[in-house]
Image (tube, rainbow, N blue to C red):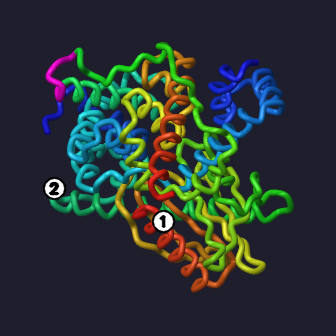
């Protein structure tokens, strides 16, 4: 891999390595969920680290993880656009503000606690992967990456209020999907 | 507050994102609204189920190697290493290279020893009354989130009660001038401090057992984290602890 002269600064590379490499699993996880493909995820993460090193001088924040994930997220969006063959079809675009169906349909007295406790990782992964992109993104950043709303807003380039409503929708959809999954076995 | 508003805000409440004033408002609504209370409960269960499931993916080793290979190599020796190097009167380039390797190893061990003796000091400090734990819980799902925001790494917290090592809590400590996570276990009357710090090196290193000031230390590295388990337990029991911990990490990564 060619390294351009501007990046050939061992001290900078060392600082970058110390700061960014511990988040490799987190980056790979986000890419897996956003792209839903292991090979594409590897390529996106590698590209992310190259770009991040290049722009490392511009990093002024205190937390590198959201900064790194924001770069990765933009790469993933570009990959989406490439797949769709058109930049405008970048996402399964969903309006957060459009008239929403109620978040809560079922009678609240169902004893769901016991049902929900039996969630296994493979099922949750599958259900999360089925969420529409903006909701999946918000959900993964919160529940798996443990980012704060403010950090998620930074990564997804949306206001904090949007993060909150996307998370609420994501969890409501996930919960409905899980209950639907349970139906036939009952 | 209406149910529509509460429906959104209860997520922020659950995530600890509301300021005290809004949190009180949402809690007041929930106290008087069984439907919203049921929702909050369900989402709380969901969050816990998701935290238990560990939905992350480990980056493939090949990806790690590719990224490390693409970074410019940091070989600039620090001034102190230079001065050590000067102590060797070098004749040829070949012997200079050989000596560099030797010095690097010597320095790394020095560094390691210094950190290990700091680890033992931290262990001793923790044994003083009231210093052992910042968060007291035998529940890994209480201890793990406690570290969020206190460290830039999430230390793995694993309950090993079934394997004979009781999780009793977590603590923030300082080693090598940096905050470090300590997870505290107990075996009979013996305290085990498991210190976890992130490392730039992603290679896994097998366990190494040492004795410093009468305490046993088992040190190993895995997936970008350095581990030091310190205790006055006998070496074989501390080794057993390390093995159980690593086995539990492996099975949770596979599951």
Tell me if residue A136 is in the magenta stretch.
Answer: no
Magenta region's main secondary structure?
A: helix
Quadrant (top left/top right/bottom left/bottom right) for the C terminus of chain B: bottom left
Comparing B29 with B164, the one in front is: B29
Q: Which residue is disc 1 drawn over?
A: B249
* Chain that bears disc 1: B
From the viewer's perspective, tell me whether residue B194 is left or right of residue B73: right
Residue B9 higher or lower than A112, as above or below:
above
Residue A33, disc: none
Lower position in the chain sequence, tag 2 or tag 1: 2
Q: Position of residue B136 (x, y in %)?
A: 77, 57
Q: Secondary structure at mark 1?
A: helix
How far apart marks 2 and 1 lie (CA) works out to: 45 Å
Look at the image and give the residue range highlighted in magenta.
A82-87
How far from the left and from the top, in percent, is residue B183? 65, 60
Above/below status of B214 relative to B182: below
Q: Nearer the viewer, residue B12 or A127?
A: A127
Parent chain of label 2: B
């Amino acid at each position: 891999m060619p390294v351009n002269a501007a990046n050939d600064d061992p001290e900078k590379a060392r600082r970058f390595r110390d700061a960014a490499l511990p988040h490799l699993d987190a980056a790979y996880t986000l890419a897996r969920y956003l792209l839903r493909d292991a090979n594409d995820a590897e390529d996106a993460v590698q590209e992310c680290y190259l770009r991040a090193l290049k722009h490392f001088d511009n990093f002024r924040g205190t937390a590198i993880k959201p900064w790194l994930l924001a770069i990765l997220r933009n790469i993933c969006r570009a990959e989406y656009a490439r797949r769709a063959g058109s930049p405008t079809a970048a996402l399964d675009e969903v309006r957060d503000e459009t008239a929403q169906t109620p978040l809560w349909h079922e009678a609240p007295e169902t004893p769901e606690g016991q049902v929900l406790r039996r969630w296994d990782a493979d099922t949750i992964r599958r259900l999360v992967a089925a969420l529409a992109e903006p909701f999946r993104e918000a959900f993964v950043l919160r529940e798996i990456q443990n980012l704060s709303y403010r950090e998620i807003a930074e990564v997804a380039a949306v206001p904090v209020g949007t993060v909150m409503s996307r998370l609420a929708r994501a969890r409501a959809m996930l919960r409905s999907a899980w209950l639907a999954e349970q139906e036939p076995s009952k | 507050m209406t149910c529509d508003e509460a429906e959104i805000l209860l997520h922020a409440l659950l995530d600890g994102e509301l300021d005290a004033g809004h949190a009180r408002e949402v809690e007041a609504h929930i106290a008087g609204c069984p439907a919203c209370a049921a929702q909050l409960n369900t989402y709380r269960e969901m969050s816990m189920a998701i935290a238990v499931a560990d939905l992350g993916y480990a980056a493939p080793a090949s990806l790690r190697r590719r990224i490390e290979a693409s970074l410019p190599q940091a070989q600039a020796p620090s001034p102190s290493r230079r001065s050590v190097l000067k102590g060797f009167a070098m004749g040829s380039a070949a012997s200079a290279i050989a000596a560099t390797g030797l010095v690097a190893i010597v320095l790394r061990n020095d560094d390691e020893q210094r950190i290990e003796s700091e680890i033992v000091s931290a262990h001793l400090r923790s044994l003083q009354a009231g210093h052992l734990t910042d968060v007291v819980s035998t529940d890994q799902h209480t201890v793990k989130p406690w570290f969020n925001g206190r460290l830039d790494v999430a230390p793995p917290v694993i309950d090993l009660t079934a394997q004979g090592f009781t999780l009793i809590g977590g603590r923030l400590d300082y080693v090598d001038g940096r905050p470090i996570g300590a997870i505290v276990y107990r075996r009979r009357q013996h305290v085990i401090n498991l210190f976890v710090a992130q490392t730039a090196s992603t290679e896994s290193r097998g366990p190494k057992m040492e004795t410093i000031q009468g305490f046993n230390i088992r040190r190993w590295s895995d997936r970008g984290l350095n581990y030091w388990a310190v205790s006055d337990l006998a070496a074989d029991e501390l080794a057993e602890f390390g093995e159980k911990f690593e086995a539990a990490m492996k099975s949770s990564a596979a599951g």
